[in-house]
């Protein structure tokens, strides 16, 4: 009789695959950890961060959902009790690995690294994942740590930090600071009112309608496109890939690519413009009132200036002088490619 009661209790505690679980997390600062699955981050109400969990895979019932304070932050952790995780959405031949601590956390700097877990699209191991919907009330700061899967954030009025190992990230209509860090995957950001930081190991980046104090984009491999960007400081750095920026309002601009062309349209005068490419052309469109000390050098390629410059030094591949009131600083350098500094057409 007692054995029957134990079996019944276990059955009642098990979570049926396909049934959605709901966890409510109290606290101003919340961190969510999940190894595999897609994540939607949306606007929430009330005072708690609500996480809706949909398990998937033949071993989904073995996943554990744990909550509690870690390192001063309220957390939700999806714990995978295996060092080999199969997530079919990654596709055949795809894999990534991450070091995970016993409590299910990973990716935080300054903490012990944990045991290595491999996630792949096919093969032996625990086939399980968890798709999440995270509802974020206004004013709650949320960190997401995801090893494999796509992320979409939309309509949130909070500070967000999104850290993924592999997978595309989309963030639209964010009222607050946004940080996106992905090992590999494209990033698309639109409508951000706050500071923006994007870092991707490989993948294209598209940024539009951003207003903040600081905008920084760094990609190891992949092009960067931007439209309607307004910031006190704008920094774009790519190991290889073109940089194309239109309708930029910033007085401090730094653009650097190891290999690829640079094109930027400025709406205002600048205190500093530094554009550097190892190989590729550079084109700058600027307003008629542009003023700066200029130093323009092309290792191989012509230099075309659409502004009157009081020349101090002219060499075959280098021009130094004063443009307009000379109050700013413009430095443009390409190892191979033409340079054009042209008047912006209103």
Image: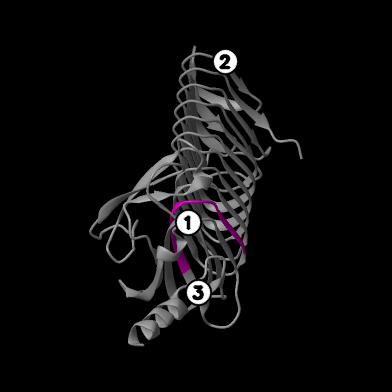
Q: Secondary structure at mark 2?
A: loop
Residue 147 highlighted magenta (yes or no)? yes
Residue range corresponding to the magenta coloring: 142-154
- How far apart in space, not on screen, are marks 2 and 3 (Cα)? 52 Å
Which mark identifies residue 140? 3
Residue 87 highlighted magenta (yes or no)? no
* Of labels 1 and 2, the one closer to you: 1
Near mark 1 (Cα within 10 A), the count class, few <14, some 14-19 or many ≥20, is few
Near mark 3 (Cα within 10 A), the count class, few <14, some 14-19 or many ≥20, is many
Residue 335: % across, % down: 45, 20
Q: Is residue 107 above or below residue 323?
A: below
Residue 306: % across, % down: 66, 26
Q: Residue at x 45, y 24 (%)?
A: 278
Residue 342 lies left or right of residue 162; in this view the side is right
Q: Quick one: quadrant of the C terminus? A: top right
Which residue was labeled with disc 2? 302
Which residue was labeled with disc 1? 58
Check the image and name the residue furthest to the front. 1
Residue 273: % across, % down: 51, 38
Chief SS of the magenta region = strand
The reply to whether residue 125 is visible in this rendering is yes
Q: Is residue 218 above or below residue 48?
A: above
* Of labels 3 and 1, the one closer to you: 1
Near mark 2 (Cα within 10 A), the count class, few <14, some 14-19 or many ≥20, is some
- Sequence-earlier tag: 2 or 3: 3
């Amino acid at each position: 009789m007692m054995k029957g009661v134990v079996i019944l209790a276990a059955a009642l505690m098990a979570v049926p695959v396909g049934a959605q679980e709901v966890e409510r997390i109290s606290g101003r600062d919340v961190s969510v950890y999940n190894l595999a699955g897609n994540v939607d981050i949306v606007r929430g109400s009330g005072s708690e961060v609500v996480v809706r969990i949909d398990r998937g895979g033949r071993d989904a019932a073995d996943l554990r959902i744990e909550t509690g304070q870690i390192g001063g932050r309220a957390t939700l952790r999806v714990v995978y009790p295996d060092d080999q995780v199969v997530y079919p959405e990654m596709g055949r031949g795809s894999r990534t690995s991450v070091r995970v601590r016993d409590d299910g956390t990973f990716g935080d700097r300054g903490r012990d690294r944990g045991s290595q877990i491999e996630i792949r699209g096919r093969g032996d191991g625990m086939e399980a994942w968890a798709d999440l919907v995270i509802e974020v009330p206004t004013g709650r700061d949320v960190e997401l740590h995801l090893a494999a899967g796509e992320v979409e954030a939309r309509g949130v009025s909070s500070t967000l930090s999104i850290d993924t190992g592999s997978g595309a990230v989309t963030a639209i209509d964010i009222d607050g600071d946004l940080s996106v860090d992905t090992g590999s995957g494209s990033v698309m950001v639109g409508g951000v009112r706050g500071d923006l930081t994007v870092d991707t190991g490989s993948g294209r980046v598209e940024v539009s309608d951003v207003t903040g104090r600081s905008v920084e984009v760094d990609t190891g491999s992949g092009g960067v496109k931007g439209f309607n960007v307004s910031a006190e400081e704008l920094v774009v750095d790519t190991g290889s890939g073109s940089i194309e920026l239109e309708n930029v309002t910033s007085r401090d601009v730094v653009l650097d690519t190891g290999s690829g062309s640079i094109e930027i349209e400025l709406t205002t005068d600048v205190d500093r413009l530094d554009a550097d490419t190892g190989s590729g052309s550079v084109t700058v469109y600027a307003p008629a009132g542009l003023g700066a000390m200029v130093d323009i050098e092309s290792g191989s390629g012509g230099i075309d200036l659409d502004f009157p410059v009081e020349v101090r030094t002219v060499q075959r591949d280098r021009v130094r002088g004063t443009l307009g009131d000379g109050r700013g600083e413009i430095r443009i350098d390409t190892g191979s490619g033409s340079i054009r500094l042209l008047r912006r057409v209103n």
